[in-house]
Every structure is written in C-alpha cells, then in structure tokens.
Amino acid sequence: MGQEQSTEANTSANAESLGVVHDLKRAVEYQQAWFNMGFCYKNVEGVAKDLKRAADSYQRAAEGKVSGAWFNQRIHEDGKLEKTAEELNDEEAKLLAGTGESGLSSEEVARRFEQYGPNELPEKTDNILLKFLSYFWGPMPIMIWLAAAVTLAQCLYGKSEHWPDFGVLMGLQFINGTVAFFEEHNAGNAIAALKASLAPKANVKRNGEFRIVNARELVPGDLVVLQIGGVVPADCKLLGPRELQVDQAALTGESLPVTMRKGDVAKMGSTVKRGEMEAIVVKTGENTFFGRAAGMIGNVVQQGRFQKVLFNVMTFLMALASVLVVIILIVLLVDNGTDTDEVLDSIGTAVVLLIASIPIAMQVVATVTMAVGASLLASKKAIVARLSAIEELAGMHTLCSDKTGTLTLNQLQLDDPVMFDEGITAKRLIFLSALAAKRLDEGQDAIDTCIMNMALKETTKEAMHAYEQVEFIPFDPAIKRTEATLRHPKEGKFRVTKGAAPQILELCVDGKRKEHKVMQTVNNLADRGYRALGVAVTNKDDEFVFSGVLSLFDPPRHDTKRTIEKAQEMGAQVKMITGDHTAIAVETARRLGMGTTIHSVGAMKGEMPLPESKEEAKRRSRAESMQGTSPSNKPVLPYQAMAPADLEDIIISADGFAEVLPEDKYKIVEVLQASGQIVGMTGDGVNDAPALKKAEIGIAVEGATDAARAAADIVLTEPGLSVIIDAMIMSRKIFQRVRNYCIYRVAGTIQLIFFFFIAIFFDPSDYFSDTDEKNFRLPVLAVVFITLVNDACVLTISRDNVEASRDPQAWHLREVFLVSAVLGFSAVAASVFLLVSAFRAGDKADDADNLGCIFFKDCKATYGEAQSAVFLNLCISDIITVFSARTRGWFFGRRPATALMIAFLFAVAATSIVTTQADFGGMKTIGAHTMGITWVFAFGWFLVRDAFKIVAYALITHFKVVDREAYLRVVDTKPKETMGIKNIRKFSNDVRAAVRKTSAADEFFLGRDEHHQNHPVGDVEAAYEREGSVGGGY
C-alpha cells in the first residue's frame, strides 16, 4: 500500500512538474512573440495572464505545494468535450484503418455519408410562431394595444360607433406585425441564401486524386490536406512528419497558435497558421469537439451605427411627440371634463395621435431598403454578410486594398530567368522550380501555377512524377520560401528551394560571393515592376548553390486605373497593401495613376530612412553644397527617430505600404481609425482575419480562405477593385434612400403632431351649430388611415431612383432635422390656414374676409365637411413630402421610381374616394369643388415648401452648418508625388480636421466618437502653427 501511495505521489509530482515546464515554455513563447509582433500590439492581457500563471506554478513547485489534482484537472478540463486520437474506440480505429494511401473510394464515401450524415452543425432555428408573435410586442405594438383597449372600453360602455375604430386598430396591429415579420423574414432568407454560397471547402483525396469539395461532404476516414490559411473542416488526426501551427482561439481561448505533430487531433473550426500536412478525418458534424461545444457558445449582438441612428431618431421623435401629446391630453381633459366617457375619448385621441406621430414603419422600411440593396449588391458579385455594413461602406473614407489579385490580374507572367550557375540551363531551372511545390491536382497558388505552366511547355507530368517528392516545406511568411526534397533513380536525392532572394542567399554556400550581383539584379527587376524569386539547388555535398533568379510580373487589371480615379473622385482614398518589394509597389502605383508615397513596413520597424520629396532633396542638396560637403543621396531622418505622432501621420498620408506582413494590417487599420476615418480592408488569408474584423468594412476578396470570409462583412465572388467601387457606389445609393425616408418621416411627424397641438385649441362649437365638441380633432379611424396608407406607400422608396453622393456618406443629422423642420412646419402652416378657412365657413362664424369661400362652395360648411377637408389636405401634404425629401434641388430634378409614383397616385385616389364617397369615421363627405380646391392648394403649397427646402440647403451650405465636402477637398488636393515629412504632417492633420467637421453634426444624436478625442481641432491647428503651414497648399 505504501509503495502504491509513493508511486502515486511521484506520478502526481511528475505531472505537476510537467505542468510547470509547460507553463514556463508557453510563457517564453508568448514573450518571444510579443517582441516579434512589430506593429500588432495585441493580446496584452493574454500574455500577462500566462506569465503570471507560469510564475505562480513555478513558485508553488519551489515551495513544495504541488498538487497532482491541479495538473490533472487542468489537462482534462475539456474532458467532457474532447476525445484524443489515442482514446478512439475500437469501432473508430477500425473505421480509420479502411483508409489507404489513395483515400476512400466513391462507393465508401456514399456509404459513410449515409451512415454519419453531412459534416455540418445543426443550426438553432427560432420557433417561427414565437418569432411572428414577437412582432406584436414592443413599444409601438403596446401603444396600439393600448389604443385598442381604450376604444374597446368605449364600445363596452355603450358607444357602438367606436366598433369600426376598434376593428381598424386591430387590423393595423395585425398588418404592421405581419408585414414586418415577412419583410425581415424574406430579407433574412435572402441573406442566408447568399451566405450559403460561401460554404467552406476541403481539399480531399479520393480514388487516388485530390479534389476540392464542400466541407459538408466529408466523412470519417477521408484523407484531407490542411494548408496555411485554411479552416480545419472536421476533427482530423495529423499524419505528416512535420509540425503544424493551429490557431484554436475561437475554441479554447488560446491566444497563440498551438504546435501540433503526427497523431494530434486538429479541431474543426480552428485555422492553420503555419505549415501544411495531410490528415485523416476522425469526427464530423455534431460529433466533433466544436459540435459538442457549440451549445456553450453564445452569440454577441453588437449594435451597429445604422441601428444606433435609427434608434436615436425614433427616441427623439417619440420624446417630442410624447411631450406634446401629454399637453394635448391635459387640454382635452380640462375642456371636456372628467366623466368616464370623456376621459376615454380624450385618452383614445391622445394615444392615436401618438401612434400617428411616431414612425412605426421606420425600422421596416430601413430593413427592406437594406435587404433589397443587399440583393442588388449580390448581382454585382458582392455578398453582404451584415446588413449594416452597407451603411458603413457608403461612408468609407479609405480603402486599404491588396495589390495582388485586386489591383492586378493575379496572373503572373514568367520572363526568361537570370542564371547564376553555369551548370544549370534556364529550362532546367524552371523545371526544378516547378518541382519545389506541393504536388496537387488543384489548389496550387498563383506563383507555383505560373511556373508549372511554363515548365509543362517543355516537359510532361510523367517526367515530373519520376522525381519522387520525399519531403516538402510549404511557403511560410516567416521564412519566405518553399523547399522540396526529391529523389530520382539516376540523379539521386537532392533539395530545391525557391523564395525571396535574400533568404535564399543566406542558405547558399556561395551566397556571400554572389550577393551583390544577385541583389543588383533583384533591384533592377523591382524597378521595372517585376517580382524576383531566388532558386537554389543542393550539390553533391548537400549544400545549397544559388542557381538563378526567376522574374515574374503581375500586370494591373485593365480597368484598375479608371476605377481608382473614380474612387478618388468620390472622396475615397485607395491605399495599396502588398508584401512585395517597395520598388515594385511604387512602379505599380505609378502605372495606376496613384500617389507614390509608398512606405516599407519593414523599414518603419528598422533603422531605414524616410523617403524625401523632390523639394526636400533639392533643399538638402543646396545646403550641403553651401557647406562645402558633397551632396549625399541618402535622407538623414530615419523612421525610428520620429515621434509616435509622426509615424501615425505617415500611415494616414501614405498611398500604400510595401513588405507588409498580415499582422501589420491590424495596426494600419487602427491608426487610420484613430484619425476618425471609416476604413475598409481587403484580405484573403487567415492572418488577415483580425484586420478584417477590426475594420468597419472587412472585405474578403475572391478566393479568400474560409477564415477570412468568416471575419469579413462583405465577400467578393469576382476579382478586381471595380467590384468594391461598384459596391461602394451602390451602397451610397442605398444609404441615400434610407436617409431620404428619415427626412420624410421626421417632417411627417412634425406636421402631424404640431398641427394637432395647435388645432386642439380651436373650439368647433363656437363656429358650427352641428357639434358640441370643445376641441378640433379627427376621428381615430381617420388618423390611423393617414398613418397606414402613407407608410405603406412609402415602402416603395426602397427602389427609388437616387444619385450616389460624391463625398463619403455621413448622416449629417443636424441637416436632416433642419430640412425636416422646414418641410414639416411649412406643412403645418398650410394645414392651419386651411383649418382657419374651414372654421370661417361655419354657420356661426363671422366670415368678413371671405376665407371660407376659398375651399367651400357657397362659402358654407358643416363641421364634418371641415374635418374631411383637413383630413384630405393632411394625407396629400404628408405623402407628397417624400418627393421633396428625395432631392436637394427642385423635386422634378430627378425622376422618381415608377413604383413610388404609382403608390402616390394610389394614396391620393384612396383618400379622395374616402372623403367624397363615404361618411368616414363620423366625418361628412365633401363635394368635387372642395376636393379639387384642396388638391390645388396642397400641390401649390408643395411648390412653396420645395423652394423653402432649397433655400434651407443653400443656407446650411453657406454658413457651413454641415461641411459636406470637407474630406473631399482634402483628397482632391493630395499630391501624386512622394511627400516629405512637412507635407505628410499637413495632409494628415487636414484629414483629421475634415473628418472631425463631417462628423461634428451627428455628435448630439450619436455621442462623440472615442477616436476623435485624441485629435481635437485645436490640436490640429496647433500642429499647423508648429509647422508654419496654416493654409496654403502642399
């Protein structure tokens, strides 16, 4: 027994020691990564926690306070969810044993698919009935329920004339809820269908051939290839001899990639950060670690800027309407008494007025407009994964675009190689370079595909297969090369490597001797826009000998130059992001008509100097000549000598960045956002995911990895920059439609609530003998009709004809409310005038000035006729406001959509029929004379209101209440040539000031953005004074 206890104690202590060693090893890895991350300052908390845990473990071990239970608990903390490869049961082991080197056969795949089902997780779906019922509960539905309850109480108290009101309110509730449900349901289905086209893929070997299939088709026992940038499609047991670095942050919270080797199980949903390895599928779908853990994963719903704007606008209108309605209710109660019937009448009127004043359909209209826009964007090959991204894309200031495949064709062309080994011919060099690639039937990268195609012009695949690939090291951004170990019956075993020339030279035995000539060749090629790859082959002593340089060129797309010009005309900067040499980036930028202020990220991290402008170089040369020293070609100001603020200025003012690693993109986005800009970032690799998530608009380009697609807001299914710019232009149109609707709806709220607020003080009994009402009001049915018909008709605005703005779109809510106030209060004035005229036509009125003769034949009207005339005017003036709200100039300056015109004519016709053919809600019918005069009055006054709107926009522009073109002016004046430090500072400060001016108008409603607080306008002006460059050009 004692021996057993001793053995157990030793085992526990050993386990604890292993845990300490593991923690210390992880801490060192974190510390090394921390200092190597360069630009990407992330995971501070994760590093601190791991270092602290390691220190605590070491301390406890030193004090003899180790506990085997602690280690066992920690290493088995996922025991309920995970089963390692070694713990596979007999049935699973037997299943895996059926997989040979050629993979599974098609028949076996079909059998297993039938047995195990698709490799996908069961999605949680909401109960459709409960989802439908949820649309009948909320602030607005509760208001309608309240109004219906009051009306029902009136009916039960004996006022049977209110049964139609009750029926209409219940119908309104049902229609609102049903329309909202189906519109959002259809929008969700449309987006789901689009996203389904982004299903993850897997590279699987079946029947002896590799092929790309949908990941859902995988079955246990499938032989797959896990490659850098790919998402692990299922739980897979690794088979290869090398190591694989896998990022499991989404599953386990590990803040650094985990190194895995043969026999380890890579979990479904994790991403491959480094390496390449074959693996065998052991679990699929809900049986995977991810599948069993899925129930514990909660979705965090973040409120986007779009939802925040709509919510704040609705809150503002609700607060305004509530205050005025409370005053109206008090006046009604004071004038009409506090009898039960009168109280119910007063409350019913107040509640219905509140319903009419609050934009019930705003969320529905906005969502429908966005969903329709998302479908249109899909037709342009841009799939929207998040609806609010449309609004953010419309306001994008800067697009950081990948060069390869987006600005260029990504169709590399191989020129004649430059040889450095007399023992190898050019054809032989290309042949060997093609062998230094992963043997895949599909899925080779662009460089390997280009070299392979060139090699196959002189040889055959059969000749290549004679060279057995013993081992292969895939491309890794850290080592910047690939390497293949080959064996041939006659030539024996040797190695071939290709990649960045400096890295290849370091491996070669003759690297030092050839370095100068090789780098001179590389630089000459780079100056001409070529990408250079060094190639080395081992000699008989297994030493690498530098053999030659391959020159590849990726030509720009034919439409890229015009697309960039179009983007700049619309106030959107395009910054080139590339991992290529700086000279290649500058040459590409020059060909595309972009600015040539290109910075090397590698130089910014080191001691390299900042590029000079031509003017600065001339001034320095003159100064050195006057001092009697020979002019030097090297600038004197290194990046590292600059203050952090200057480095931020460099990023903001740059036209592009070269030698960029994926993690550098995150810092670039962070700095641009700190200046107040809305940033778009393109990406395709797994390492791009953090930057895509950080940017307001993450754009996964065509051919992106599954990880990049999952992190992106918009996924492109067609290559090229023109797709992004087309999507930006279309999103600006979509945004314009939503903004136009907001102007219309705010104006309508102002018109209704302020008119009734004024009208409530008019006493009909003093003017009409056919009523004893103490306050003017419309029947509940009439007010509900105005809201229902007009909001239903304006749904057609989602397809209205609009023009994309030249400047990045902002809400400019100060402008929205000012223009809405002009349209709304001018409508109130007209409605009050008609009300006064109608009251002057009463049989008890003294109409000395004949105002009553304007609208009524024989200059006389009953109270019911007066109500009908006011009702008709309110309906027409409300719906016609949309035509003024949709333009900045005259309403006829842009043709409205046919659907909108039809909806308008329907609303006018329906209202006219109601007022002339039926005693609607207690109102009396009016004749054709009164209807015609009311039409002419409403349309005539609309022209006056439209003129007021034009004047309002002119005054807003003149007094710069909203400076719409501040950012556009800065972009237009940006120089094309390389900027020096003085102009860099000025431009970056101009950008901050312009963005600050643009967004200042929204702060009252949205709050001040945190990223503006670091760069107030005063600081910008102070920076100008420091540079002595306030005003003036570049």
Image: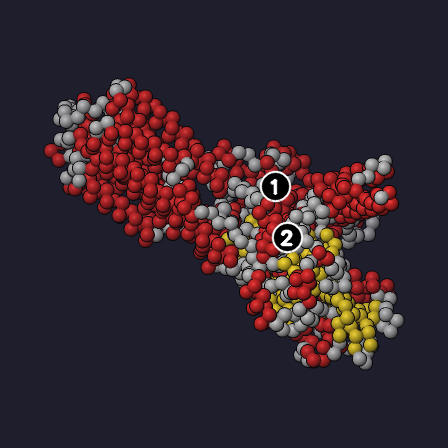
* Image quadrant assignment for residue 593: bottom right
Residue 524 or 247: which is nearer the viewer? 247
Residue 234 or 592: which is nearer the viewer? 234
Name which residue lies at 71% across and 51% down: 257
Mark 2 neighbour density, 10 Å: few (under 14) some (14–19) many (20 or more): many
Mark 2 vs 1: CB contact within 8 A: no
Name which residue lies at 60% across and 51% down: 292
Image mark for residue 675: 1
Residue 488 lies, in percent from the top left, at: 79, 77
Q: For the view shown, which residue lies furthest in the right direction? A: 541
Residue 718 lies, in percent from the top left, at: 54, 62
Mark 1 neighbour density, 10 Å: few (under 14) some (14–19) many (20 or more): many
- Where does label 2 land, which residue? 289
- Mark 1 belongs to which amino acid? Ser
Name which residue lies at 66% across and 61% down: 92
**Which is more foreground, mark 2 or mark 1?**
2
Question: In the picture provided, is 944 more to the left or to the right than 299?
Answer: left
Whichever of callouts 2 and 1 sits on the residue coming sooner in the sequence is 2
Residue 850 lies, in percent from the top left, at: 16, 29
Q: For the view shown, which residue lies furthest in the front direction? A: 1
Mark 2 and mark 1: span between their CA atoms?
A: 42 Å
- Mark 2 belongs to which amino acid? Phe
Question: In the picture provided, is 16 more to the left or to the right than 324?
Answer: right
- The reply to whether residue 209 is visible in this rendering is yes
* Image quadrant assignment for residue 499: bottom right
Residue 211 lies, in percent from the top left, at: 61, 69
Q: Secondary structure at mark 1?
A: loop
